[in-house]
Each structure stands twice: as C-alpha cells, then as structure tokens.
Image: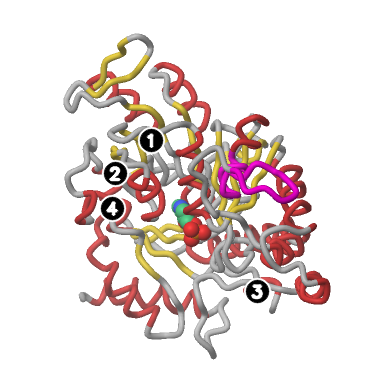
Amino acid sequence: MTEQEKFLVEGIRTRLESVLPTEKFVPLHEPYFVGNEQKYVDECIQTGWVSSVGKFVDRFENDLAEYAGVKRAVAVANGTSALHISLVAINVKPDDEILAPALTFIATANAVAYCGAVPHFVDSAYNTLGLDPKKLDDYLADISEMRGGVCYNRVTGRRIYAVIPMHTFGHSIDNDALAAVAEKYNLIIVEDCAESIGSRYKGVHTGNFGRLAALSFNGNKTITTGGGGAVLTNDEALGKFIKHLTTQAKIPHRWEFSHDHVGYNYRMPNINAALGCAQLEQLDGFIACKRALADRYKNLFDGLDGVKFFVEPSFDTSNYWLNALMLEPEHAHLRDDLLTELNGHNIMSRPAWNLMYTLPMYADCPRMNCDAAEDISRRLVNIPSSVSLIEGR
Ligand SMILES: *Cc1c(COP(=O)(O)O)cnc(C)c1O
C-alpha cells in the first residue's frame, strides 16, 4: 500500500473506532432483547404451547399484517421457505425462468431452483443496490418476445414468468419502475423483503408491490424469532392457500388426516412467534436507532476522500438493516486490505455476496451484462449495524 492508501484504510478504521465499543469484538448485527421476549416465551413453556399452533402464531400474523399494511401475513419456518412457498403458490413450473438479482443472498436463487426453475440474473442499480428496472426493460426488449400475453426468452425458448426484486440491506428498489416493466412483460412480482421489514417506498411498506413478499426473522435480521419468516400478501385467497400449503395441506378436521396438495411443514413454532410478537412491539424503536446510527456514519465519512457511506435512495425510508461503505472506484483494490484492517481491530466487516452466476450451481444460468453488480461487489464493505450500538451506549 502507498502512504495515501494506508491513510485511507487506517482513516476508515480510526473513524469507526471513534463511535464503536471496540474494547470487545463488534459483530455486524446482533439481536436485541429488551422487551417482552422473556415473558412471552415463558408463557409458551408454562402453558405447553411451544409448537406449531398457538395464540402467538395467530397474533404474530395479525400484528405483522397490520404493521406492513397488507391483508394477510403467514408465519413460516424461515425466509428461504417463505420465498419457496411463494413461488410454489404462484405455480412456478419446472423450466420457467425467474428473473432475480445477481447481487443477492443465495436463498433468492435457491428458492427458484427448488421449483426446478431457472434463475435469470439481472444487474443492479447504483442508487438502490437492488435490481435495475430500466436495464431490465432494455434487456427484455432485446431478448424476449410476447406470445399470447406470455413472455418468452427468444434465446432459450423458456417462459419468463416472474421477477424477484430484493431490497438490499433494507433499501427499497424503485418499485414503480419495476411495476411498469412487469406489466409490459406480464411478469408476476415476488418481493424478497428478507432485509427490509420496516422499510417504506414512497411511504408504503415494502412487500406491498408484489403479489407476494417474503420476510426473514433470522438471528441477524432487524427483528428475529430465532429462525423464522413470513409471507405477506394483499390477495386474501392466496394468503389462505399459502397457510394451507405450509401446514402440510391438511384439511381441518377433528380427527381425520386428509390432505389435498403436496404440502410442506413450513410452520413457525409458537415459541418462535412469541419472540416475534415481542420484537415487533419494538421495531419502530429499533429502526429509529438504526437510522440514527446510519446518520452518525454518514457524518463520520463525509470528510474522508476515497470512500462513501451508502445512503438510502430518495424515494425510500430505509430500515438501514446493514450499513455499507463504498470505496471510490480507484480504491476498489483496497477492499481486502480494509476487511483485514477492520476485522483485525474488533470491527466485524464483510464484503457483498459473491454474485450468483459466479457460483458453480448457477454458472450456466442466463443473465444480462452485470457490470454494475460486479463493480458494486468489488467496492462494498458492510460495517456493524446493531441496534445496541445506539441504544446500548
Ligand atoms: C436472510 C435472507 C434470506 C433468507 O432468510 P432465512 O430466514 O435465513 O432463510 C433470503 N433472502 C435474503 C436477501 C436474505 O438476506
């Protein structure tokens, strides 16, 4: 490293040290339990209602739907199963192509593969880090054709059936722009909202822009149920069908075991939902902390040349699930030095995910030119984002 490069890498580290409790290792995102978690979990244990039915499951589903402003929420085992069941419910067929960002967590692509379908990768937009609707529009104009109202890939001959935008690190994509593309090519939108609970696009909660949306309550997400997820929808019939599919498609009856579909055991246990109810009560407070932390980071890095703190797009009120620094293009080669420097000084940091088509399972999948996603993934570094970093100090 040159002197100037060292100055940048160490400058980032010392700035972070000035606001983080680095006496101990500072993780990227840790859960925060200061509400009714203990009380509600104790209630499950005392009453014996710990498993797949119980009042906390019902309550969590109602509270979630109300919070997100959707008609129905179905609590499930995790975010990955929420994505999978959403694709099953809209009838994704083997060999369908499903558009998905190249820059995402693996679960987005895996859910497509579980259906025997083929992920088709889309480039990212610099202002959101999520799927770029404008590029997608131009690309589809080029490679697809409409036959009887159905979009086909002219190169592979397969049906292009749906698109899964993902709201990266909590920042909403441009939903209006994607809606226009989806309408033009008759694509169903399934939102991957695993990272965006509480994030609003033009004031409306993410998850209202697709036919279905998947949430995750994994331990590293904004709120957690230990492990868990949910499907959101404004289509009540579809919501009811998803609840049925996730409960082994069992026809309710007092003693008889009868099933009318290949169902799944994707239920969220009551004891996890109890945690979820308590966490949801605190979500607005968590988001206030996370936005305050993001603001602090933004000010901290405003005066340092060579790096920028990633700020929410103008149409978005983000939950800032994971904060991100972007090295300027001329410093992209310093990313791994920066990761070494920060992780070596008790500041957990990590790069963006490897792009999906660089992984062996998805290397042969169709994709557009993903220059922006490649550039972003070379320059991006996530930094500590826990609620406790504001609240606990
Ligand atoms: C966390 C996450 C998921 C999966 O959630 P799990 O609950 O871990 O299964 C899916 N997509 C994205 C983008 C995620 O960040």
Picture coordinates of residue 319 (x, y %)? 61, 53
- Helix, strand or loop at label 3? It is helix
Q: Secondary structure at mark 2?
A: helix
Pointer 1 or 2: first along the chain: 1
**Tag 1 and tag 2, C-beta contact below 8 Å:** yes
Q: Earlier in the sequence, mark 3 or mark 2?
A: 2
Kindly identify which residue carries mark 2: 372
Q: Main secondary structure of the magenta part?
A: loop
**Residue, far bottom:** 23
The residue beneath circle 3 is: 388
Q: Is residue 253 magenta?
A: yes
Q: What residue is shown with label 4?
A: 355
Q: Earlier in the sequence, mark 4 or mark 1?
A: 1
Q: Position of residue 307 (x, y in %)?
A: 38, 61
Mark 2 crowd level (few <14, some 14–19, many ≥20, 10 Å Cα): some
Write the residue at 61% across / 51% down. 197
Real-space Cα distance between discs 3 and 4? 30 Å
Q: Is residue 300 visible?
A: yes
For the residue pair 335 and 267, the one nearer the viewer reads as 267
Identify the mark at residue 132; answer none if there is no mark. Answer: 1
